[in-house]
Structure formats: C-alpha cells, structure tokens
Image (tube, rainbow, N blue to C red):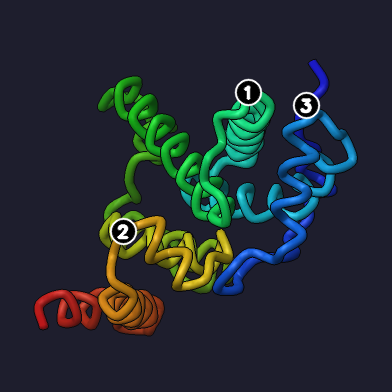
Amino acid sequence: MTPIVDVGGGGGGGGGGGGEDSGLEGVLRSASAGDESAWRWLVRRYAGRVYALAKSRCGSADVADEIVQSVFATAAVKLRAGEYAERGRFEPWLFRVTMNRLRDEMRRVRRQATPTDPIAMRDLSLASPDARPGHAELSSLDRLRRALHELSPQDREIIELRHHGGLSFNQLSELLDEPLGTLLARHHRALKKLQAILSPHGRDRADEEHDS
C-alpha cells in the first residue's frame, strides 16, 4: 500500500510561532475539499516534526513511520468528513492526535512485554546504570535519547513537544491545558534535569534537582 505520507522527504518547516499564519486556514479548507496540493503542503509542513517527536518517544524509525501514517490518516478523515473544528488551533490539535497515538503504542508495547523479552524490555526502560555502555561508546544522539528516558514522563513530554515537535509555548499551553507561566517554569526545570543527567556526575545531580 502506498504510504499516505512520505516521511523521507518530510519537511520540518513552519510552526513555532504563537499563532498560525492566515494562509493555513485556507489550506485546511482546500484540503477538506479534496485538494491534493493543499494536502501535500500540510504534509511537507508538519510530517517531519511529527516524525521527530514519534521517533524520540518510541526509539524506532519503523514505528515512527507508522505513527506518522496513522496521524495523517486521522487528519485526512477528520478534514474530509468536516469533523475538524479547531479553527486557528491546527498545530496543537495535530500534536494532540500524535500524543494520543503514541500513548496507544506505548500501552500496546507494555501489554506485549514479558520479563524474558529483551527487545520489549529495552523499549520500555533503560538498562541499569551498571549495564549501560560508557559515555565514550555512545554518540551524542544516543546519550541524549538515554538521558531523556531518565526523566519523568511529564518532563520528557514537555521537552519533546517543544524541541522535537517544535510547538511554541503558547501552543503547548493550549495542548497541555496549563497556564503559560507554569509551563515555562516546568520546561525550565525539565531542561535543568536533562543537563544534569548529561553532565559527568549526572545521576546524582539530577536526583538533587528532583529533591529540591
């Protein structure tokens, strides 16, 4: 079956601002009416960011591809059926769909995991500190991914939505239903914990951040 979204050429452009540009509503109307060029524009603008978030959360390129296909399939159905009613809030809505799909995937993995299934256990949690390779053996990306997994789910989510999903703080505030000031403070604390984990004595410093 031909993929709905070609992630390989996916764009990461756009987004990040406080509000959606005025042209987006027109593109959404055209996509709702079945305009393929409008749909391609939406894919180019958002598929790369959805993929980056999915890959960061699940750690698997194949699963991330499947999630991107699922998210944009949902978007296509909602738009073409006239069920999209989030005027001016397309990005938070799209990433809410993405996060729901990711949570479904994590629940599926947990249900399938067994104590003797090393692949599933690897996906669910990191190995114990003593079993992990030394930092010199890991690429920067590997270290960052491992460090993200050491954060609480809430801290990890806000960092990934901001830095992989590319959402602005205003969009995050809407998506997570939190006051902007609270969200900014929580993001700042999460970044400090991540930086502490990545430092030479990371685990101890991160624990101190958690206790403070």
Q: Secondary structure at mark 1?
A: loop
Q: Which residue is mark 3?
A: 3
In this view, the residue in front, 46 or 170, is 170
Amino acid type for the residue under numbered disc 2 = Asp
Q: Is residue 66 visible?
A: no
Please state the horizontal and vertical placement of residue 202, each as a whole percent of the image. Answer: 31, 79
Q: Quadrant of the N terminus?
A: top right
Count neighbours of disc 1 (C-alpha within 10 A) and say few if under 14, some if 14 to 19, many if 20 or more.
few
| 155 vs 127, nearest the viewer | 155
Looking at the image, can residue 181 be seen?
yes
Q: Which mark is residue 177?
A: 2
The quadrant where residue 124 appears: top left
> Looking at the picture, which amino acid does disc 1 mark?
Ala
Measure how far apart labels 1 and 3 are at the Cα level: 20 Å
* Residue 184, position as x, y percentages in the image: 34, 79
* Residue marked by disc 1: 81
Regarding mark 2 in the picture, which secondary structure is present there?
loop
Question: Counting other residues with Cα less than 10 Å from the Cα at mark 3, is it few (<14), some (14-19), or many (20 or more)?
Answer: few
Name the residue at 53% across, 40% down: 85
Which residue is painted at 35% across and 75% down in the image? 187
